[in-house]
Amino acid sequence: MSTFKSDLTALLPNLRAFARSLCGDGVWADDLVQEAVMRAWANQDKYQEGTNLKAWLFTILRNHFYNEVRKNKRYQDVGDGETAPENAVHESQLSSLHLKDLVRELGKLPPDQREALILTSVDGFSYDEAADICGCAVGTIKSRVARARRELEAQLDGADIGPAAAGAMSSSGPDGKLVARG
């Protein structure tokens, strides 16, 4: 099982970035990741070798997040921007899209749209994989991604937020925050 441990450890930055995109709070994101890792570790016998470990872990994390939200623990609507993900892009790394603005507007999206966009455009999951993680139909994921892109494009004065533009971000830097590639 040392392969499981090393694979799980390698995915920690991705898990933290995804958790942060869901909740918008670094401390809560760390708590979500810790709980997801503990649950995965306790249930590693249920993981089928050769399947997508990243998708399995993201599903555990996502389910835990929504369970916490249902319990009304620590969750605040990100519409006011107070709990939106922080910008971790150094000013010298800004692309023509002004990633600082993109990250701020991303935090204002409804959670289901933000989640779908992050999974497909930042974390590199296919629509099928994202649908499995979210427990919905592939068409639903495609619709959420399309709505999220339209909303971001409108908020960012028509900037292209297609796959190539969203790909300008990687899921995380060493601290788990969104950063620009470059």
Image (cartoon, rainbow, N blue to C red):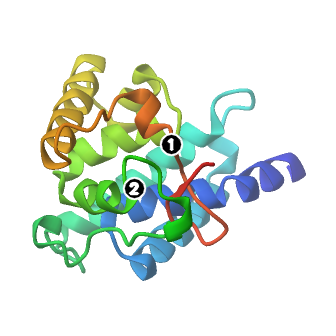
Q: Which mark is residue 99?
A: 2
Where residue 144 appears, as percent x and y from the top left, is 21, 32
Q: Earlier in the sequence, mark 1 or mark 2?
A: 2
Where residue 80 appears, as percent x and y from the top left, is 10, 72
Answer whether residue 8 is visible to the viewer in this image. Answer: yes
Question: Residue at left 74%, top 27%?
Answer: 50
Distance between mark 1 and mark 2 Cα atoms: 9 Å
Q: Secondary structure at mark 2?
A: helix
Place residue 47 in its image quadrant.
top right
Where residue 40 appears, as percent x and y from the top left, is 60, 55
Q: Which mark is residue 168?
A: 1
Question: Residue at left 32%, top 46%?
Answer: 115
> Relative to 42, is 35 above or below?
below
Q: Secondary structure at mark 1?
A: loop
Tally of numbered tags: 2
> Relative to 162, is 1 above or below?
below
- Tags 1 and 2 touching, CB below 8 Å: yes
Question: Residue at left 55%, top 60%?
Answer: 93
Q: Is residue 11 left or right of residue 93?
A: right
Question: Residue at left 62%, top 52%?
Answer: 43
Q: Nearer the viewer, residue 42 or 103?
A: 103
Place residue 128 in its image quadrant.
top left
Where residue 130 appears, as percent x and y from the top left, is 41, 31
The amino acid sitting under disc 1 is: Ala
Q: Nearer the viewer, residue 96 or 153?
A: 96
Q: Is residue 181 left or right of residue 108?
A: right
